Amino acid sequence: MSKAPAAQQTLRMLTFLARQRGPVAAARIAEALELPRSTAYQLLAEMQRQGYVVHLPEDRRWGLGVAAFELSSGYARHEPLSRLGRPLLAALVDEIGESAHLAVLHGRDVLYIVEERAPRRPHLVSDVGVRLPAQLAATGRAMLAQLPRHQVRALFPDRTAFVDRTGVGPSRYSELRRLLDDIARHGFATENGEITPGLASVGVAVTDHVGWPAASIAVTFETGRGDAHAADLAPLAGRLSKVADELSRRIRGNPLARPSSVELG
């Protein structure tokens, strides 16, 4: 018998939600965990106040919230993911001659955990440990496009959630949604001057063992150089996808490198 039944029930509930393919009804949660419905509603209400779950009133269902996402992405910043990704990025930089970086989502931001800078290329703002708005960065957009719609909506509930750096980029949810739908269709994300004027990036998501966006890889280049990267991004995106697939494979084979088994709502 647990000496902290409320804590045990809360953890069981979070674990149950993490294993679902989408939001579920409170009655189903209570039934699956053999809890009184009143207890299930009380726990869900408190976790909602703390941001660990979100309630979708139109569907009468519950899913994991932003706080749970931040908790899971915090684990992704540990050494295993960086260690697995660094040699792949180094090889990519040697091949294409452009700087590359690896990032994870942290709430509405991306957090950079690896940067491999190419020789004679501009200094980037994406140093290790730097956080940038996810809706502006190619790394962030690639991961946001992999999230369920309700999760993105929870991250960007209104216009105050949108940070502006250079005067360009989505500033409301409808604009972001159209952008993410395009990214999902093409399989890669781009940004051009939204982080730093004169620099553009292409990003691809890295998925973990449950198909969740564990991280993303991006390459940044000067828009004024007139090279093939700026003129035609599909070949570069294809090369990035191969690196992302290899990192995904390594993550799935290394439990210590998995950011989390949590699947948000």
Image (spheres, grey):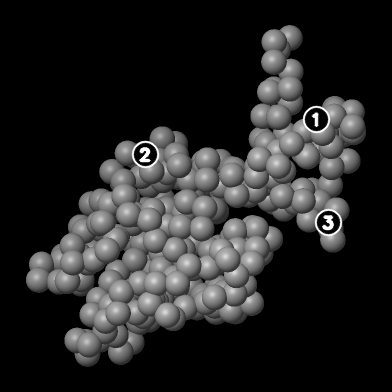
Question: Horizontal and vertical percent for residue 113?
Answer: 32, 50
User: Which label's residue is closer to the chain start, 3 or 1?
Assistant: 1
Residue 33, label in figure: 1
Task: Please give the residue where the numbered disc 2 appears in the rendered image.
Answer: 78
Say if 254 sits above or below 231 in the image: above
**Crowding near pointer 1: few (<14 within 10 Å), some, many (20+)?**
some
Q: Residue at x 49, y 62 (%)?
A: 143
Amino acid identity at mark 1: Leu
Q: Residue at x 41, y 35 (%)?
A: 256
Task: Please give the residue where the numbered disc 3 appears in the rendered image.
Answer: 57
Residue 185 in sight here: no
Amino acid identity at mark 2: His
**Crowding near pointer 2: few (<14 within 10 Å), some, many (20+)?**
some
Question: Horizontal and vertical percent for residue 192?
Answer: 36, 80
User: Which label's residue is closer to the chain start, 1 or 2?
Assistant: 1
Q: Secondary structure at mark 3?
A: loop
Question: Horizontal and vertical percent for residue 127?
Answer: 26, 56
User: Which label's residue is closer to the chain start, 3 or 2?
Assistant: 3
Say if 15 sits above or below 193 in the image: above
